[in-house]
């Protein structure tokens, strides 16, 4: 079975005076994780989901949060378990 995983990163610019509400609101999304937050209002957020629609919905909802000035997708990758590298074989001899 090939399960897909969508991984994206977004740059969020928020009103610095509202970070105390913006950060927890973003962190409440099950597909979102704040990777970096700057007191100036810039945040790097990663999104990870098996469903692309969930990611698009999360981005849209983040853009609509009070205090968010902008949220822009900067990276998106889709991987599947078929893309995963094969495990390395131990070539050391046991003596």
Image: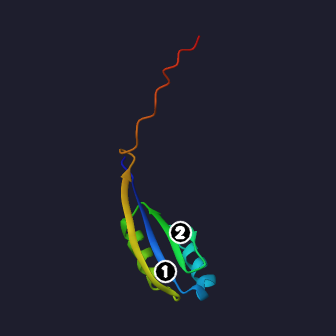
Label placed on residue 13? 1
Q: In this figure, what is the number of numbered marks?
A: 2
Between residue 33 and residue 4, name the one nearer to us. 33
Task: Between residue 80 and residue 73, name the one nearer to us.
Answer: 73
Q: Position of residue 3 (x, y in %)?
A: 39, 52
Q: Secondary structure at mark 2?
A: loop
Residue for point 57% across, 80% down: 40
Give the distance between the C-alpha atoms of the residues marked 2 and 1, in whole angstroms.
20 Å
Nearest the viewer among 69 and 4 is 69
Quarter location, residue 59: bottom left
Q: Which mark is residue 30?
A: 2
* Left or right, 49 with reference to 38: left
On screen, residue 31 above or below 19? above
Q: What's the residue at 63%, 83% (across, down)? A: 20
Pick the quarter of the image with the C terminus: top right
- Give the class, few, some or many, for how many residues have Cα within 10 Å of label 2's Cα (few <14, many ≥20): few
* Tag 2 near tag 1, CB within 8 Å: no
**Does residue 61 sit above or below 7 in this rendering?**
below
Q: Give the mark, 2 or 1, whose residue is nearer the N terminus.
A: 1
In the image: residue 61, left or right of residue 18: left
Residue 16 in picture, x, y percent from top left = 58, 85
Vertical placement of residue 18 versus 7, above or below: below
Query: 10 Å neighbourhood of mark 1: few (<14), some, or many (≥20)?
Result: many
Colour scheme used in the picture? rainbow
Give x and y (percent) for residue 79.
37, 53
Q: Which residue appears farthest toward the top when viewing the image?
A: 95
Residue found at x 52% / y 83%: 14
Q: Residue at x 39, y 71 (%)?
A: 73
**Mark on residue 72?**
none
Q: Secondary structure at mark 1?
A: strand
Q: Position of residue 78 (x, y in %)?
A: 36, 57
């Amino acid at each position: 079975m090939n399960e897909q995983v969508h991984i994206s990163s977004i740059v969020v610019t928020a009103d610095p005076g509202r970070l105390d509400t913006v950060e927890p609101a973003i962190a409440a999304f099950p597909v979102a994780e704040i990777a970096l937050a700057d007191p100036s209002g810039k945040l790097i957020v990663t999104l990870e989901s098996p469903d692309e629609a969930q990611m698009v919905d999360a981005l849209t909802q983040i853009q609509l949060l009070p205090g968010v000035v902008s949220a822009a997708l900067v990276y998106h990758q889709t991987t599947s378990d078929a893309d995963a590298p094969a495990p390395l074989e131990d070539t050391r001899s046991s003596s």
